[in-house]
Amino acid sequence: MQKSNSFTFNFLFYILLTIKKTIGVVSVLIRYFMTISTQIMTATEFKSKCLGIMKNVHNTGQPVIITKRGVPFVKILPISSEEPF
């Protein structure tokens, strides 16, 4: 009986550690790649709506993050009038 309880405890402990690590990684990625107003989309979605997205970024000033296979790949930002080219 004790072996079963030990196995259950170890298994639950492993699950909790995995969840904690996952939440930590996700929260770091969220803080790094996102602000409240940032939109995230896949490369495929960006490809099909490119001109509209660029117009929206220019008009609203809200950046867009493009992901490739679920990983943030590029961030599209508007150019302000004060920035040199």
Image: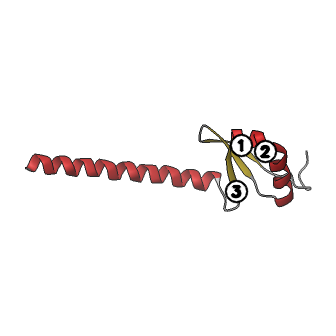
Q: Closest to the observer: 44 or 7?
A: 44
Sort mark 1 into few (<14), some (14-19) or many (20+) by Cα contacts within 10 Å: few
From the image, tell me which residue sits under label 1: 45
Query: Under tag 2, what secondary structure?
Result: helix
**In whole angstroms, how far apart are the C-alphas of marks 3 and 1?**
16 Å
Q: Are marks 3 and 1 in contact (CB under 8 Å)?
A: no
Q: Dot 3 surroundings within 10 Å: few (below 14), some, or many (20 or more)? A: some
- Check contact, mark 1 vs mark 2: CB within 8 A: yes
Q: Mark 1 is on which residue type?
A: Glu
Image location (x, y in percent) of residue 38: 70, 56
Q: Name the residue under label 2.
A: 49
User: Who's the residue at 92% across and 55% down the image?
Assistant: 81
| Residue 80 picture location, percent across and down | 87, 55
Q: Nearer the viewer, mark 3 or mark 2?
A: 2
Report helix, strand or loop for mark 3. loop
Which residue is depicted at the point 70% across and 38% down? Answer: 44
Taking 19 as reference, is 83 left or right? Answer: right
Q: Earlier in the sequence, mark 3 or mark 1?
A: 3
Crowd rating for badge 2 (residues with CA inside 10 Å; few <14, some 14–19, many 20+) = few
> Which color mode does the image show?
secondary structure
- Determine the CA span between mark 1 and mark 2: 6 Å
Q: In this view, does 80 lie above or below 49?
A: below
Q: How far apart are marks 3 and 2 (CA)?
A: 17 Å
Q: What residue type is labelled 3?
A: Thr
Q: In which quarter of the image is residue 43?
A: top right
The amino acid beneath tag 2 is Lys
Q: Check the image and name the residue furthest to the bottom.
A: 36
**x and y percentages locating residue 66 in the rendered image:** 69, 44
Q: Mark 3 points at which residue?
A: 38
